[in-house]
Image (cartoon, rainbow, N blue to C red):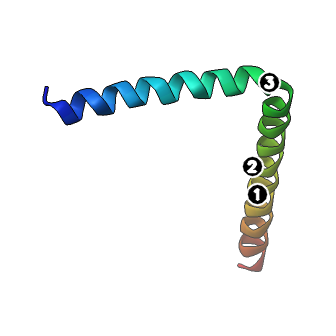
Amino acid sequence: MDKVGVIALIIGIILCALGVYGIWVFLPEVIFVIKGLGGIVVLLFGLMLAIFGILIVKD
């Protein structure tokens, strides 16, 4: 590997470690965000199904 690849690998490992540390420190907030994103996904899925149902009923 060349120098750029090694540097990118080292920086990537450092950023992954910082990300894991950040998740560990802010774990309750991370759980709230995951719950919120899950709710948004369910909301969008329900909206798509409702629109799909309206389109099928019209035919």
The percent coordinates of residue 4 (x first, y second) are: 21, 36
- Which class describes the residues within 10 Å of circle 3: few (<14), some (14-19), or many (20+)? few
Q: Quadrant of the N terminus?
A: top left
Which numbered mark, 2 or 3, is in the foreground of this view? 3
The percent coordinates of residue 33 (x first, y second) are: 80, 39
Query: Mark 3 touching mark 1, by CB under 8 A?
Result: no
Q: Secondary structure at mark 3?
A: helix
Labels 2 and 3: the sequence-earlier one: 3
Residue positioned 70% across, 26% down in the render: 23
- Which class describes the residues within 10 Å of circle 1: few (<14), some (14-19), or many (20+)? few
Q: Amino acid at mark 1?
A: Leu
Residue positioned 77% across, 36% down in the render: 34
The percent coordinates of residue 39 (x first, y second) are: 83, 45
Q: Please name the residue that numbered disc 2 is placed on.
A: 41
Query: Mark 2 touching mark 1, by CB under 8 A?
Result: yes
Q: Quadrant of the C terminus?
A: bottom right
Q: Secondary structure at mark 2?
A: helix
Q: Which of the 4 image quadrants contains residue 37?
A: top right
The percent coordinates of residue 28 (x first, y second) are: 86, 26
Q: Please name the residue that numbered disc 1 is placed on.
A: 44
Q: Amino acid at mark 3?
A: Leu
Q: Which mark is residue 27?
A: 3
Q: Amino acid at mark 2?
A: Val
Q: Nearer the viewer, residue 32 or 16?
A: 16
Query: Mark 2 touching mark 3, by CB under 8 A?
Result: no
